[in-house]
């Protein structure tokens, strides 16, 4: 099993990075997230890898962080989610947001990805919720999920619901509202949340 590869980045294209190690160029399927982090062609990079073996193909997948690799492996364990689907999902989100989406049951965060329908999104949440809790991929994600569970009614719940109606995902809404004072009124929470979102754009 190839645990990791370190060498010169010789080529990149969407969802692919080629790393040359000891004269051999390894084609690593990867995410846009990893591609944005590994630097430029000609630089030395290190990717954590996963070797996927099928009857008709052997493919190597590479990731910049351990948390992204962990999310990839989790997605492969979901029935109906192959490696290409896993890459697509992780290209649209970060490991932290992925963990939060699963923890809060946010199916819309996954259906935004091309090729992921409501049924698959529900399976991802159903099959990975317990695993995410055990892995604790992000303490911040766990804290936000707990905050949402405790404050799913009242002003906080209203504010999160209102932001969802405005087009934000459950994950985005919960993440922003959790940073505010839970004792504020719903209108005030909504106003301050929109201000925060505006600053982060």
Image: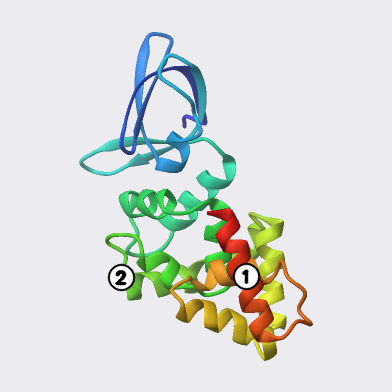
What residue sits 47% from the left and 29% below the top? 2
Image height of 54 relative to 16, above or below: below
Quadrant in the rendering for residue 180: bottom right
Query: Residue 33: in sight, yes or no?
Result: yes
What residue sits 24% from the left and 38% below the top? 57
**Residue labelled with disc 2:** 117
Of tags 1 and 2, the one toward the viewer is: 1
Label 1 sits on a secondary structure element that is helix
What residue sits 40% from the left and 19% below the top? 41
How many neighbours does mark 2 have within 10 angstroms: few (below 14), some (14-19), or many (20 or more)? some
Label 2 sits on a secondary structure element that is loop
Seen from the viewer's position, the closer of residues 76 and 192 is 192
Query: Residue 129: in sight, yes or no?
Result: no
What residue sits 34% from the left and 75% below the top? 118
Seen from the viewer's position, the closer of residues 81 and 32 is 32
Q: Position of residue 183 (x, y in %)?
A: 79, 82
Image height of 5 relative to 198, above or below: above
Give the residue at the far left of this rendering: 56
Image height of 119 relative to 116, above or below: below
How many neighbours does mark 1 have within 10 angstroms: few (below 14), some (14-19), or many (20 or more)? many
**Residue labelled with disc 1:** 193
């Amino acid at each position: 099993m190839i645990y990791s590869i370190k060498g010169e980045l010789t080529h990149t294209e969407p969802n692919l990075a080629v790393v040359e190690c000891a004269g051999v160029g390894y084609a690593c399927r990867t995410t846009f997230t990893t591609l944005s982090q590994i630097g430029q062609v000609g630089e030395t990079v290190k990717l954590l890898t996963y070797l996927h073996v099928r009857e008709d193909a052997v493919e190597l997948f590479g990731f910049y962080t351990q948390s992204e690799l962990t999310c990839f492996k989790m997605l492969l364990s979901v029935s109906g989610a192959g490696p290409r689907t896993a890459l697509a999902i992780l290209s649209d989100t970060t490991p932290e947001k992925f963990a939060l989406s699963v923890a809060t049951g946010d199916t819309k965060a996954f259906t935004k990805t091309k090729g992921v329908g409501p049924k698959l999104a529900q399976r991802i949440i159903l099959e990975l919720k317990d695993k995410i809790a055990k892995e604790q991929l992000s303490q911040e994600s766990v804290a936000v999920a707990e905050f949402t569970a405790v404050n799913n009614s009242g002003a906080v719940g209203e504010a999160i619901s209102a932001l969802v109606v405005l087009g934000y995902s459950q994950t985005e809404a919960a993440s922003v509202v959790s940073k505010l004072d839970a004792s504020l009124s719903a209108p005030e929470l909504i106003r301050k949340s929109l201000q925060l979102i505006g600053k982060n754009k």
